[in-house]
Image (cartoon, helix red, strand yellow):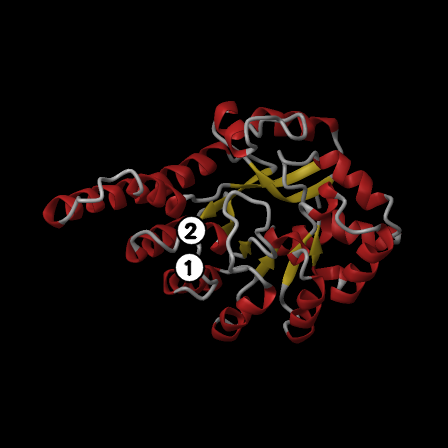
């Protein structure tokens, strides 16, 4: 086991401009979200290994570009533009995954992304290659960002490939309220993952953010799915739960299935660790949440 906590939910961006755009133009926790900042955090010793996540934005990019097309655009020209757009979006996902692998290093595991709205066959073939690489520790999906349900046909091969390779899938969990991808549909409510878990027994699935604010629904799902995991990213950083309820919820779900995560750069990992340490867990529980569980699941 590594020294320091294992941050199982941390976002990285290729440069400061990209990281600031993702944060709405400001350093929400004093960080831009680049690899040099993570190295500095790790050098201080409180953070050991991290899982560096990249996330696909294909559907939002598609909507933005198509929204700029003339209303009268139709026929061959529309099909031509649509074909070029789809090729570009697939290329962007591939470029993101290549980049996150390039910046991985000992202590920084790569979490590649899968998008259900791009060419499904190409995406599945890419993932089949990626999950066999030692630096790739998990696959990230974000149904809410893609505006689809977790059992969307575009995800089915993603789950199969990940399960067969023994690689966990990390999904956004819980609400999208207040985000730039907010929708009337709560795509990532815990109940929407039931068909996935039914169809892919043996899949290691991590529903992030303690599925806030659907904590009780997560507990209900967890009772029936002993292999399901969750993480504390966003919940710790934003202080969404008082300490006593946080401890009670984690214990009810199963401490051995809960992972520390910060949601860096939106929140500072060390501040999240402070909140975790002061919540009231036992020393043994803290050891599991801080690093032990993530080490077992991802390493």
Q: How many marks?
A: 2
Residue 132 can be seen, yes or no: no
Residue at position x 56%, y 44% from top? 179
Whole-percent x and y of residue 38? 62, 30
Circle 1 packing at 10 Å, graded few (<14), some (14-19), many (20+), is many
Whole-percent x and y of residue 106? 58, 36
Residue at position x 56%, y 62% from top? 204
For residue 57, which quarter of the picture? top left
Residue for badge 2: 114
Whole-percent x and y of residue 267? 68, 36
Mark 2 and mark 1 lie on one chain; the one further toward the N terminus is 2
Residue at position x 69%, y 72% from top? 220
Residue for badge 1: 158
Residue nearer the viewer, 16 or 184: 184
Residue at position x 41%, y 48% from top? 130
Vertically, is 175 above or below 263? below
Residue nearer the viewer, 276 or 69: 69
Vertically, is 58 above or below 106? below
Residue nearer the viewer, 291 or 263: 263
Whole-percent x and y of residue 149? 46, 62
Circle 2 packing at 10 Å, graded few (<14), some (14-19), many (20+), is many
Residue 57 vs residue 24: left or right?
left
Residue nearer the viewer, 145 or 36: 145
Residue 58 vs residue 41: left or right?
left
**Residues at badges 2 and 1 in contact (C-beta under 8 Å)?**
yes
Q: SS for tag 1? A: helix
Tell which residue pokes out farthest to the front in this image. Answer: 72
Residue 270 vs residue 282: left or right?
left
Residue 244 vs residue 10: left or right?
right
Residue 155 can be seen, yes or no: yes
Q: SS for tag 2? A: loop
- Distance Cα–Cα, label 2 vs label 1: 7 Å
């Amino acid at each position: 086991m590594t020294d320091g906590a294992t941050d199982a939910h941390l976002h990285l961006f290729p440069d400061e401009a990209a990281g600031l755009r993702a944060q709405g133009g400001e350093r929400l926790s004093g960080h831009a979200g680049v690899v040099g900042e993570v190295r500095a955090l790790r050098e201080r010793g409180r953070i050991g290994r991290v899982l560096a996540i990249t996330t696909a934005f294909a559907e939002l990019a598609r909507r933005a570009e198509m929204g700029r097309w003339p209303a009268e655009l139709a026929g061959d020209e529309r099909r031509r533009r649509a074909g070029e757009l789809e090729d570009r979006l697939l290329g962007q996902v591939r470029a993101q995954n290549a980049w996150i692998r390039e910046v991985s290093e000992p202590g920084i595991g790569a979490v590649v992304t899968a998008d259900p709205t791009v060419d499904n066959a190409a995406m599945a073939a890419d993932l089949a290659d990626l999950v066999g690489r030692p630096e790739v520790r998990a696959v990230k999906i974000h149904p809410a960002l893609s505006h689809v349900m977790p059992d969307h046909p575009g995800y089915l091969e993603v789950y199969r490939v990940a399960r067969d390779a023994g690689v966990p899938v990390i999904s956004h969990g819980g609400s999208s309220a207040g985000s730039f991808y907010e929708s009337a549909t709560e795509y990532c409510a815990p109940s929407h993952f039931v068909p996935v878990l039914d169809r892919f027994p043996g899949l290691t699935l991590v529903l992030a953010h303690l599925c806030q604010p659907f904590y009780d629904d997560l507990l209900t799902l967890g009772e029936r799915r002993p292999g399901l995991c969750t993480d504390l990213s966003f919940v710790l950083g934003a202080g969404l739960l008082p300490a006593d309820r946080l401890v009670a919820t984690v214990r009810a779900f199963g401490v051995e299935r809960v992972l520390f995560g910060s949601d860096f750069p939106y929140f500072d990992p060390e501040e999240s660790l402070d909140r975790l340490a002061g919540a009231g867990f036992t020393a043994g529980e803290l050891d599991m949440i801080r690093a032990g569980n993530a080490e077992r699941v991802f390493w």
